[in-house]
Image (cartoon, rainbow, N blue to C red):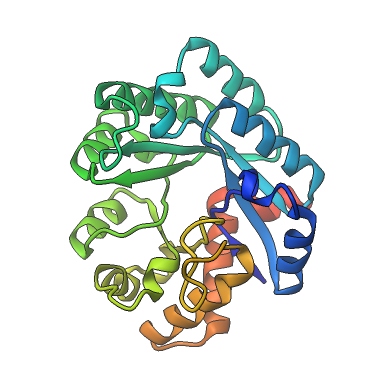
Amino acid sequence: MIVDSHAHYDDEQFDADRDKVLEKVREKGVVRIVNPSSNIASAEKCLKLANEYDFLYTAVGIHPHDATEFSNEALKKLRAMSGNKKVVAVGEIGLDYHYDFSPREIQRSCFASQISLAIELKLPLIIHDREAHKDIMDIIKAEKAYTVGGVFHCFTGSVEMAREVLDLGFYIALGGAVTFKNAKKPVEVAGYVPSDRLLIETDSPYMAPVPFRGTRNDSGNLNEIIKKLAEIRNTTSEQIEEITSLNADRLFGLKLLEGDI
């Protein structure tokens, strides 16, 4: 009973064998997957996939890399797509000051506007935070994003940053980085996050864990992340599976939806 809280099966890396990959991950115990989008075209593809596969859910949003695409028309499209019951969040949204593919001012405006949309729709947020933590937190507070909550995906910040995130009621998702040989901060955070706020993710096809690092990632590799978290937290893999699945179901309302589809 494993839930992948963040994967990108709309990615073109899966175009040749998507069906086979998704069949394989089901055989490895993955029962639900949340597939966030990165722009309007991605959101449309994610929604199509979610309607085709009963265990796939999606989030609609514009990634900071594509923030220049954001407009009132794009907002209308996101709002319209969110009417589908397979849409469980607004995301992947946030700020990325590492690559700066979009101007920072536009990233901030795009992020704030999509927080407002999430509040309007009463949907949680899936947040991308890369080298932009102060601005992320300032916007979250200013826009009252904590009223809908959400998750900081692929968290690689410090325990101090994690404390800020947790204090505002957000979840923290850990992925392949926690298994990396020189990982320090992710390991410290993995031992710090309370059980009721921990999620797991793959960010497939990216961020494959050891021993698959450098290959195309998929949700079947969550078992490696689960084993590492169990080791760090001095518990069992079964316990990590259980708590992270319950947390994902609670945050995104997945079990409720599953019974209604």
Picture layout, residue 197 above or below residue 243: above
Q: Horizontal placement of 226 versus 51: left or right?
A: left
Can the viewer see residue 261 in this picture? no
Where does the image place residue 150, in percent across and percent down from the top left? 44, 46
Q: Horizontal placement of 141 versus 26: left or right?
A: left
Where does the image place residue 169, in percent across and percent down from the top left? 35, 51
Can the viewer see residue 207 in this picture? yes
Name the residue: 46% across, 61% down.
207
Where does the image place residue 54, in percent across and percent down from the top left? 79, 51
Name the quadrant of the N terminus.
bottom right
* Residue 49 image-quadrant placement: top right
* Residue 5 image-quadrant placement: bottom right
Q: Horizontal placement of 61 versus 130: left or right?
A: right
Name the residue: 51% across, 87% down.
236
Name the residue: 71% across, 32% down.
84
Picture layout, residue 83 above or below residue 211: above
Picture layout, residue 149 above or below residue 217: above
Name the quadrant of the C terminus.
top right
Name the residue: 38% across, 33% down.
64
Q: How many numbered markers are drawn?
A: 0
Where does the image place residue 75, in percent across and percent down from the top left? 52, 18
Q: Horizontal placement of 66 versus 81: left or right?
A: left
- Of 260 and 174, the residue lying toward us: 174
